[in-house]
Amino acid sequence: MTVLLAPQMPRTLPQRVGWALADGWIVARRALVHWVRNPTVVAYQLVWPIMMVVMFGYVFGSAMTVAGGGNYREFLMPGMFGQTMMFGIATTLMAVTTDASRGVTDRFRSMPMSSSGVVLGRAIADMVNSCGELAILVACGLAVGWRWHEGPGNALAAVGLLLLLRFALIWVGIWLGLLITPEAAAAAWAPLFPLTMVANTFVSPSQMPGWLAVVAEWNPLSATVAAIRDLFGNPGMPGDSWASENAVLLAVLWPLALVAVFLPLSVRRYRRLAR
Amino acid sequence: MTSPALVAEGLRKRFGANAALDGFDLTVREGTVCGLLGPNGAGKTTAVRILSTLLRPDGGRALVGGFDVVGQSAQVRHHIGLTGQYAAVDEILTGRENLEMWGRLYHLGKATARRRADELLERFGLTEAADRRVKHYSGGMRRRLDLAAGFILAPRVLFLDEPTTGLDPRNRTEVWRAVRSLVAQGTTVLLTTQYLEEADQLAHQIAVIDRGRVIADDSPERLKSLVGGDQLDLVVADAGALGAAAGIVARVTGAEPETDADVRRITAPVRDRMEALTATLRALREAGVTVEDVALRRPTMDEVFLNLTGHRAAAQDRDEQEVAA
Ligand SMILES: Nc1ncnc2c1ncn2[C@@H]1O[C@H](COP(=O)(O)OP(=O)(O)O)[C@@H](O)[C@H]1O
Ligand SMILES: [Mg+2]
């Protein structure tokens, strides 16, 4: 049997970045292969938002009024986009906890590979997954009469804000995933659901009781949803609180703050796991 | 003399109130195999996880390949291979894809990783199943794939945590052969096991671990003589003759035998295997005792423990702890 010797350790910064990217790509490709071979998981993930569009758009929609007037389904779709980004965290959690419980994470950690590579790979894979999800949801929105009205430039900016939120939540997911079990991850939707409801996703906070409205307005999801409603030109009158008036700013700041906190935390957690 | 491949000094690790390692000391010479022998819950996995940089000790110090496992963990990872106690393989990928992926993560080129995967699949008898998803593999096949991944590079120090638990004898032999070939190339191996037989087959040095501490550390020969060498098992045809037969065995072997009336079995430690076997059988025949079955074997872990510690390996409650953990 041939003998292969351990590779030289990367020394310079460019070498280290090179390793992280190479490792990240291999880890990401593995996750993408998982999805391709388990299309039911992906389909299941998509049934949820489509079901919500149908339920809220048609079942409850007739009884819903949009604060400030406008078509409810036009109001609803940005909320759905935002909620889907938020639920994406469950995908991250599931993948991270499964690998940890099967010992795959330990194998990664015992290898001479870049530790940022592993988390980077997860992030790349989840971003690809979310882009696909968003594309299908946009098609679904177009089918129920949702449109963007402010030109393709603004529409793309809105998509960018959505993906920024998803990117930020990946790091929350990785960090949390390294703390909990797959069983807990499977139940993640239970706390997530209220988090996506106490926001401006389905009804405007101005229609909620006072204290709930404050929570809803400061919810990071609300910032993104309010900002993209603006950018898409969809109805939904923002309230007059500072948070509502500076939605675009918050839609950028919130995710950046989450990344600034949770990216280093998750890399650190990964390195020091079980210590 | 070269510096040791692995040194652990006073390693300590607690999980809550439970001390998994409690002053663990071990030195393994370059190019040798050390068998870490102990019952469930003795601390074997914890020791391996600390030495392979997965876990940080609460106290003590360890060097692997001359590098500190805490302060120089990245360097340590460059020189080790690890096959954990539970198969860490990707269920959705095929066996070949698994090995190619791990190979790429060891920074082998694409073609090299592929060639290496083919070689290892062949070596571990997985060529036929190579393109099937691991999800459909049997436990033994997963285990072999997991081991193959630990062999991708010839690491300086290879950690194998209970590598043959759950394998059938043929696969066990295959694993042993692979370990030997790596050692021939200069790899140092730390292998944990619950079987003295396995440590005896492979190891130059056996360290017995009990409650987080090494309680005996010696060559297999010396350890075996310490615990009374091999064991002779005799089954007599007539339960009534058990007492008389035990007396004869005691006289011939010079050791106090244990008897088990339910299965009509007498067990005694023996020093000179063949001599003891023939002498005992002759004496029994002369006394007119019919022997139904006879076997010479290595002492079991339990017997080693009984001899070294005076207590049985508390396997049962530790098993429960393991399940709970
Ligand atoms: N992550 C953990 N949390 C709590 N207790 C643990 C953990 N890992 C091991 N232990 C405990 O430490 C002791 C040693 O375990 P371990 O090293 O797995 O033993 P072995 O591998 O020899 O069976 C056991 O009592 C076990 O229950
Ligand atoms: Mg163990």
Image (cartoon, coloured by chain):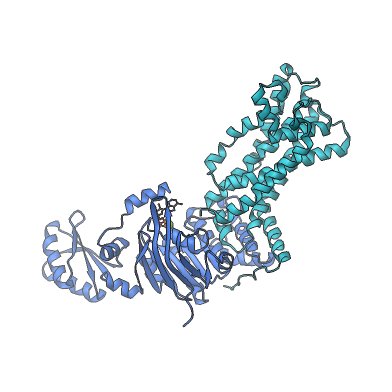
Q: Is residue B256 found left or right of B179 in the rendered image? A: left
Q: Residue at x 63, y 44 (%)?
A: A172
Residue B265 x/y as whole percent? 20, 60
Look at the image and give the colour of chain A. Answer: cyan
Looking at the rendering, which quadrant does residue B103 occupy? bottom right
**Which of the 4 quarters of the picture holds residue B289?**
bottom left
Q: Is residue B155 visible?
A: yes
Could you say where residue B134 lies in the image, as x and y percent from the top left? 56, 53
Q: Quadrant of residue B315?
A: bottom left
Residue B222, percent from left and from top:
31, 75
Q: Please identify the residue farthest to the bottom as the structure is shown.
A: B1
Give B76 or A61, whichever is nearer the viewer: B76
* Chain corresponding to blue in the figure: B
Q: Quadrant of ligand 1?
A: bottom left
Q: Say above or below: A234 vs B87.
A: above
Q: Is residue B7 above or below residue A28?
A: below
**Left-right relation of B191 to A52:** left
Q: Nearer the viewer, residue A174 or B262?
A: A174
**Going by the picture, which residue comes out furthest to the top?**
A63
- The residue under the point 81% across, 30% down is A142
Residue A163 drawn at (x, y percent): 74, 42
Residue B226 left/right relative to B145: left
The N terminus of chain A appears in which quarter of the rendering?
bottom right
Residue A232 lies, with reference to residue B116, above or below; the image says above
Residue at the farthest front position: A242
- Residue B124 makes an appearance in the image: no
